Amino acid sequence: MLKMVVLASGRGSNFIAIADAVNAGQIDGRIEAVLSDKAEAKVLTHAKKRGIPARAITRTDYESMATYEEDLLKVIESYEADVLVLAGYMRIIGGDFLKALKIPVLNIHPSLLPAFPGLSAQKQAIDYGVQIAGCTVHYVDESLDGGPIIAQKAVDVLPNDDEESLSMRILVEEHKLYPEVLAAMAEGRIKCEGRRVRVEVKKEEQ
Ligand code: GRF
């Protein structure tokens, strides 16, 4: 059983997709808690509705980024989770935090990395004129959206797409990809060799 802590800043649609996959038995896991750096984040309301412990730890309550992350780390560790799941967490995680945290950290990014890291990835894709976009689940390291790639899904960019329509089409895929990766992690099907990560296919699907 994969014990997860979710860290998110906003809307929470990826959290919902993961929570639904847990409830449907698709992921052999449990969401121990949802934490947010924003007191007003919708994700906290969604978590509470599902009876999942939800708590805001806001940066402005702390003197520095270092003291904020120290506290965040303590709270995450208290849940004894197997993985920290970033789902729309809008801050860069510090190197000291990553070194101290003894569990893997996963993130989902709305582009086919390494293209378009950072903010507004879907707008970057539209502005660049790519014809295929998508999303990526990756391990988090100290780089910006540059950790080892676990899985990706592609979507076509249509001639009339704008940032919003493309974001929505990518989001549909995000909601499938993140639960798939977490299900694979729970079943020990993720194999890493340096930067090269392989998600093994489920036995019955072979
Ligand atoms: C998603 O587009 C995700 O790829 C990015 O932030 C957004 C979060 O959306 N990292 P939500 O809060 O899960 O709805």
Image (cartoon, rainbow, N blue to C red):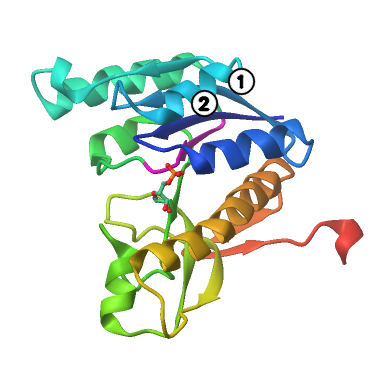
Q: Judge whether residue 87 is colored magenta.
A: yes
Q: Is residue 187 left or right of residue 32?
A: right
Q: Which mark is residue 206?
A: none
CB at mark 1 closer than 8 A to ligand 1? no
Quarter assignment of residue 177: bottom right
The percent coordinates of residue 140 (x first, y second) are 39, 49
Which residue is outermost to the left? 63
Amino acid, disc 2: His
Image quadrant in which the N terminus is located: top right
Horizontal arrangement in the rendering, residue 4 relative to residue 61 (left or right): right
Q: Which residue is mark 1?
A: 50
The residue wearing badge 2 is 46
Element assignment for label 1:
loop
**In the depicted view, which residue is nearer to us: 186 or 22?**
22
Disc 1 residue crowd, few under 14, some 14–19, many 20+, Cα 10 Å: few
Q: Viewer-proximal residue, 102 or 69? A: 69
Q: Residue at image x 27%, y 71%? A: 124
Q: Position of residue 160 (x, y in %)?
A: 41, 81
Q: Quadrant of residue 50?
A: top right
The magenta span reads: 82-88
Q: Estimate the x, y position of residue 105 in percent, counting from the top left.
A: 45, 41
State the residue at coordinates (36%, 36%).
10
Q: Is residue 193 magenta?
A: no
Looking at the image, the residue that sits furthest to the right is 204
Residue neighbourhood size for the residue with mark 2, other residues' Cα within 10 Å, grouped as few (<14), some (14–19), many (≥20)? some
Quarter of the rendering occupied by the C terminus: bottom right
Q: Residue at the location (51% across, 17% down)?
A: 79
From this view, report whether residue 39 is shown above or below residue 120: above
Q: Are marks 1 and 2 in contact (CB under 8 Å)?
A: yes
Q: Residue 191 location, x and y as percent?
A: 63, 57
Q: Amino acid at mark 1?
A: Arg
> Tag 2's secondary structure?
helix
